[in-house]
Image (spheres, grey):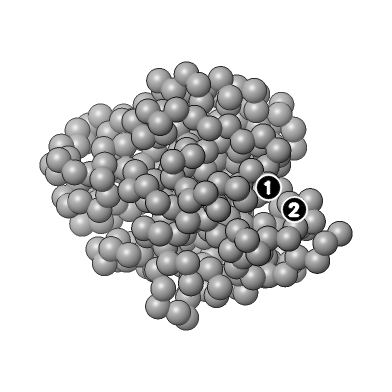
Amino acid sequence: MTPVFAKAYNPSEVHFMSDDCENRNEPRKVLMCTPEHFSIIDVKNIYMQGQKGNVNVDRANVQWDAIRNSYLALKNQKIIDDVLVIDGIEGMEDMVFIANQSFPWVMWNGEKIAIMSRMRHENRQNEIPYVEDFYKDHGYKIVELQSKYHFEGMGDMIAHPGKRLLYGGYGFRTDRAAYDEIARIVDAPIITLELISEHHYHLDTCFLPLNHSEVLIAPDAFTPESLNIIRRMFEGVYEIPEEEAIEGFACNAHMIYGQNKNSSAALVQRGNPVSLNILQQSAAQVLEIDTTEFIKSGGSVFCLKMMVY
């Protein structure tokens, strides 16, 4: 196998393939944050423009309950192990997007760690202590970044399915330099991907690994160098229509990886026919759900959950 070092790689530096990286067990528990304080009070991304005060709170609660119930059904089928919930906090209207405040990981010795985010927007940084409390209660070692660079958790850092290999998006919310420190912390390689479209301010809006060898992407999100390395690392790269990526948030679907297709599932915003067809080839069941109230704020299923150990 090609030696793979724990560092942050620019696309031109990547000399290995995913099979050269060590295997990793996927997390099997879903964490969510209750939506009762969700609203839009300012503009942090392009989707929020013109949406201040425009959230239908009752509808958002119904949509969130439907997502949670979908996860509970998957728990009953033993596709996932558990559904955990923390309470949203008054005055923290974005906390419902629980993918952003942290990045959980398991070290070589089995120790669970949680790297806490350094959010670009100050009012979102206030969410961190409440999410940190969850990890402390569940046996995680808390890791605070020593550098001052911004990092927005699993919104921008996504693991290669089943491998100790990570992809780190940067350009809008997370700083490229943050990944140098993070790679040392997790003791794993990070391939950095530069984002260039304001519609894709987080990696989870444009990059969805389907399995070890296939990925769903919004190609306009990336520089040519980043696109090239994605095509190198995955045998199958599916480019979805722009309207499904931007209006339908299809890349922000949640793919639950099983040992094989029969034990995998996906949740995706309804109304994305091309993406739905691709997901149905990769997962035993695909659940179409409605997240339109949350899309007003720039997030869908992936943003509304965190997979934890």
Q: Return the residue at label 1.
A: 233
Question: In the structure shown, which secondary structural element does the residue marked by tag 1 occupy?
Answer: helix
Residue at the far right: name it. 1
On the rendered structure, is 9 left or right of 70? right
Q: Return the residue at label 2.
A: 17
How far from the left and from the top, in percent, is residue 260?
Answer: 74, 33
On the rendered structure, is 241 left or right of 109? left
On the rendered structure, is 304 left or right of 284? left
How far from the left and from the top, in percent, is residue 255?
Answer: 57, 36
Question: In the structure shown, which secondary structural element does the residue marked by tag 2 occupy?
Answer: loop
How far from the left and from the top, in percent, is residue 51?
Answer: 17, 40
Q: Nearer the viewer, residue 9 or 67?
A: 9
Q: Nearer the viewer, residue 228 or 238?
A: 228
Report the amino acid beneath label 1. Answer: Met
Q: Residues within 10 Å of mark 2 (few under 14, many from 20)?
A: some
Residue at the far bottom: name it. 146
Report the amino acid beneath label 2. Answer: Met
